[in-house]
Structures are given as C-alpha cells and as structure tokens.
Amino acid sequence: MKFRKLEEWEDHSVVSGGDGAMLLEAVDAFDDRPQYVHVSWAELTNEEFSILEDGGVIEGGEWDSARHTLDHIRE
C-alpha cells in the first residue's frame, strides 16, 4: 500500500524530549473508507522521510500494519 503525508508534529508521549510523528494517508486503499497510519519519524528511513517531506508517495513499511480508518483515529 502507498502513503502520502497529511500532517506532522512533535510527539512528546513517545520519546522523552519529543519525537517527530506523521499522519499518513493510504493513496490506494482497497475499500471506500480512507485509511491512515500514525508513524514516528524513527520508523522511517531517511529516503522515505525525504520523499514524504517533498510531497511524494512511499510504499508502506513494517509500520503499515497499524492502518486505521478515520473513525478509529477519532476514538
């Protein structure tokens, strides 16, 4: 599955002192509901991070299994 960046922020709940995080949206979801994943910058390779920062699309990694619909994220 392929993803693009929607948002990014510093997440102080993951690492003391803060860690960057991104909300990614699946661009090729298989159903009618958009799917999202919250990813720590530490989970991304330098190449993946750069592509997302430039507005590009990346292939999902090991973190891809954490996909949720918007309904799950709001809960």
Image (cartoon, rainbow, N blue to C red):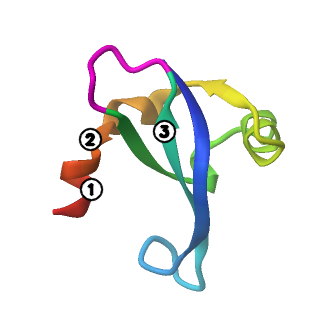
Instruction: Compare residues 25 and 11 and report the one nearer the observer.
Output: 25
Distance between the alpha carbons at the discs numbered 1 and 3:
12 Å
- The x, y position of residue 56, in whole percent, is 75, 33
The answer to whether mark 2 and mark 1 are in CB contact below 8 A is yes
At label 1, the amino acid type is Ile
Task: Examine the rendered structure and indicate whether residue 7 appears above or below residue 66.
Answer: below
Residue of label 2: 69
Distance between the alpha carbons at the discs numbered 3 and 2:
9 Å
Residue of label 1: 73
Distance between the alpha carbons at the discs numbered 2 and 1:
7 Å
Q: Can residue 30 be spotted in the picture?
A: yes
At label 3, the amino acid type is Glu
Q: Earlier along the polypeptide chain: callout 3 or callout 2? A: 3
At label 2, the amino acid type is Thr
Circle 1: element type? helix
Q: Image point 51% across, 25% down: which residue?
A: 27
Question: Majority secondary structure of the magenta segment?
Answer: loop
Q: Image point 50% across, 81% down: which residue?
A: 12
Q: Earlier along the polypeptide chain: callout 1 or callout 3? A: 3
| Residue 29 magenta-highlighted | yes
- The x, y position of residue 62, in whole percent, is 46, 29
Residue of label 3: 25
Task: Examine the rendered structure and indicate whether residue 58 appears above or below residue 41.
Answer: above
| Residue 54 magenta-highlighted | no
Q: Residue furthest bottom?
A: 17
Q: Which residues are magenta?
A: 28-33
Q: Residue furthest front?
A: 32
Check disc 1: other Cα within 10 Å, few if <14, some if 14-19, many if 20+.
few
Taking 49 as reference, is 25 left or right?
left
